[in-house]
Image: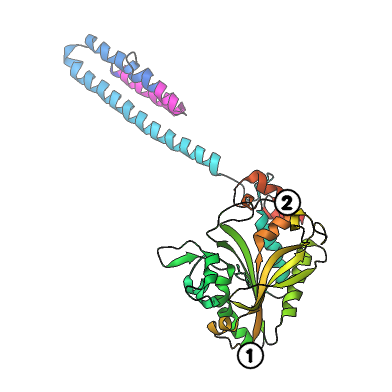
């Protein structure tokens, strides 16, 4: 009996060393501790042991049983750890240096147009600035010569937050901040030149031409003797670059409290060349960019002397520009999140930056 118990112990150890998966251990448990298992069999043999040795033999079998149980638990724990690690290795192990060969996405058409316009203005010495989407009444309206209850506010109803803040209705909301930031340029004899693209929000009834969330790109330039001809030059240059052809522009009077004089800049219709077609509602012109000479009150609000300096500002409708650039007829496409629609405008889908620079 005692020898048998020792043998079983050895046998168990041998087998347990070979067990590599939790199923193997379960098999072992059944084999040794199950109803018809070795240990249970040994218990039954206890009947044949002479009375005086029964107690000792019983203890021996119990010890064996407990030892096997403990080892099984230990083995299971060990295997669980190994299996978990294997799973982690399989899912998390990757080689950073492996080239990515699958296409993982494409740029949003607004991003493409924004980058294009940014690089054109960068090449003309403009700084590209970022500005938050949440602002306040002062920056969005008051600093722009739009006092409380001014009728111009009716056009720009927006989403008000409980914190006395609001979602900006136009990129002009950053004018005061940017003018202040670069004011020292003027003292050093350099102009202020900056563009600041951004997402804007308005309480708008949505249809094919109107969205409550859209993109603009604001641009300002301030220096001594800046005039409307500077404004026309920069706009013409930028648009000719974007559309890769000579663009004819015209200015019409337009009212915005933060510019004086204010204009609507139109471009000659690219589809009919000015003859008149459905795209330009037979007028031959497309409205693209409100602009004007920065109002003296706006310069003063930023601590710049309007007697000494003048400047222009424009608010390019980037969403509209993207619509024209890519021939998108419905503005709702941009915020739709519909990849089938959005990825078709992408000139190149991207994989990883490395592949991209090879393509370029
Ligand atoms: N912020 C104006 C708008 O969104 C556009 C604008 C910008 C007009 C700069 C003049 C100068 O309606």
**Residue at the outermost left position:** 52
Residue at mark 2 to residue at mark 1: CA–CA distance = 47 Å
Check disc 2 and report the residue beneath it.
348
Q: Quadrant of the C terminus?
A: bottom right
Q: Is residue 230 above or below residue 307?
A: above
Look at discs 2 and 1 and give the one toward the viewer. 1
Q: Residue at left 22%, top 22%?
A: 59
Magenta-highlighted stretch: main secondary structure? Answer: helix
Indicate the quadrant where residue 31 lies. Answer: top left
Q: Is residue 72 above or below residue 225?
A: above
Taking depth in this image into account, of 52 and 46 the one nearest to the observer is: 46
Check disc 1 and report the residue beneath it.
308
**Residue at the outermost bottom position:** 307
Query: Does the stretch in magenta take in 9?
Result: yes
Q: Residue at left 22%, top 19%?
A: 58
Q: Earlier in the sequence, mark 2 or mark 1?
A: 1
Taking depth in this image into account, of 148 and 221 the one nearest to the observer is: 148
Q: Are marks 2 and 1 in contact (CB under 8 Å)?
A: no
**Which residues fall within the magenta stretch?**
3-27
Q: Residue at left 47%, top 74%?
A: 148
Q: Quadrant of the N terminus?
A: top left
Q: Quadrant of ligand 1?
A: bottom right
Instruction: Look at the numbered disc 1 and say if its residue's Cβ is closer than 8 Å to ligand 1.
Output: no
């Amino acid at each position: 009996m005692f020898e048998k118990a020792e043998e079983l112990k050895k046998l168990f150890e041998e087998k347990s060393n070979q067990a590599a998966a939790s199923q193997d251990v379960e098999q072992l448990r059944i084999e040794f501790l199950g109803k018809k298992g070795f240990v249970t069999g040994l218990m039954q043999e206890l009947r044949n042991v002479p009375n005086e040795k029964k107690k000792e033999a019983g203890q021996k079998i119990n010890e064996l049983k407990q030892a096997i149980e403990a080892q099984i638990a230990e083995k299971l724990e060990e295997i669980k750890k190994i299996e978990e690690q294997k799973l982690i290795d399989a899912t998390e192990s990757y080689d950073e240096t492996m080239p990515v060969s699958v296409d993982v996405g494409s740029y949003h058409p607004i991003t493409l147009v924004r980058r294009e316009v940014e690089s054109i203005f960068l090449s003309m010495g403009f700084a590209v600035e970022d500005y938050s989407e949440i602002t306040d009444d002062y920056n969005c309206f008051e600093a722009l010569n739009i006092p409380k209850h001014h009728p111009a506010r009716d056009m720009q109803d927006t989403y008000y937050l409980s914190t006395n803040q609001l979602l900006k209705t136009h990129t002009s909301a950053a004018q005061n901040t940017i003018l202040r930031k670069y004011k020292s340029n003027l003292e050093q004899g350099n102009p202020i030149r900056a563009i600041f693209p951004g997402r804007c929000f308005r309480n708008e009834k949505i249809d094919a031409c109107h969205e409550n969330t859209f993109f603009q790109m604001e641009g300002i330039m301030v220096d001594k003797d800046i005039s409307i001809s500077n404004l026309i030059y920069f706009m013409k240059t930028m648009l000719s670059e974007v559309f890769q052809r000579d663009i004819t522009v015209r200015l019409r009077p337009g009212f915005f409290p933060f510019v004086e004089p204010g204009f609507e800049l139109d471009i000659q219709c690219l589809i009919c060349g000015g003859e008149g077609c459905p795209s330009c509602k037979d007028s031959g012109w497309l409205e693209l960019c409100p602009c004007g000479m920065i109002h003296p009150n706006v310069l003063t609000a930023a601590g710049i002397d309007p007697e000494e300096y003048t400047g222009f500002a424009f608010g390019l409708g980037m969403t509209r520009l993207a619509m024209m650039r890519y021939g998108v007829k419905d503005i709702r496409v941009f915020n739709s999140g519909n990849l089938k629609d959005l990825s078709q405008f992408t000139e190149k889908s991207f994989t990883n930056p490395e592949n991209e620079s090879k393509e370029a």
